[in-house]
Image (cartoon, grey):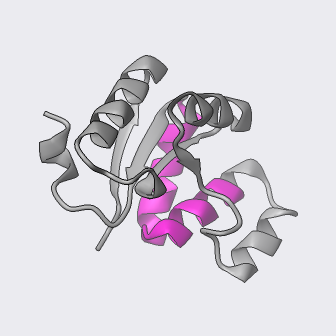
Amino acid sequence: MKPYLREYANDEKLQEDIQLLSTKGVSKDNIYVLSHDDDRTKRVSSKVDANTIGLSEMDAKSAVGSLFSKQGDELRAKLKDIGFSQEEAEDFEEDLDEGKIFLIVTETENVEGLLI
């Protein structure tokens, strides 16, 4: 199943939606936060106890490669390793360049319906 992704410009709205998903039974193990700024990603994820896409979600080749790659390359690799196509990862990385922050939910059906 392809992960669910929603982009936000507002960190507070993202945090509210993560809390809503948690109250509706979505496991924190399936909720991820991603932005172009590592500090922002860590700050937001720690406030709501969400995950970041780290080495455990990346395949070995991507994990090692990300140690030596540019930020954009690393973000695209993370997006691909969590379940998006190369083309989707490139499109999403452009949105991250514009300052968006992503909520990504894996292994959960009907996330859109839960966020209403």
Q: Nearer the viewer, residue 116 or 91?
A: 116
Q: Which residue: 49% across, 70% down? A: 86
Q: Is residue 113 magenta?
A: no
Above or below — where is 46 with respect to 74? Answer: above
Above or below — where is 105 with respect to 39? Answer: below
106 left or right, relative to 82: left
Number of on-image labels = 0
Q: Which residue: 71% across, 74% down? A: 62
Where residue 39 appears, as percent x and y from the top left, is 73, 31
Location of residue 73 (image quadrant): bottom right
12 left or right, relative to 50: left
Q: Which residue: 57% across, 29% down? A: 44
Task: State the extent of the magenta-drawn residues as a range.
Answer: 73-98
Secondary structure character of the magenta stretch overall: helix
Q: Quadrant of the N terminus?
A: bottom left
Location of residue 107 (image quadrant): bottom left
Location of residue 13 (image quadrant): top left
Q: Quadrant of the C terminus?
A: top left
Q: Which residue: 42% across, 42% down? A: 103
Where residue 49 appears, as percent x and y from the top left, is 54, 38
Where residue 22 appears, as percent x and y from the top left, is 33, 41
Q: Nearer the viewer, residue 38 or 51?
A: 51
70 left or right, relative to 54: right
Above or below — where is 14 with respect to 24? Answer: above
Where residue 21 appears, as percent x and y from the top left, is 29, 41
Q: Nearer the viewer, residue 7 or 24?
A: 24
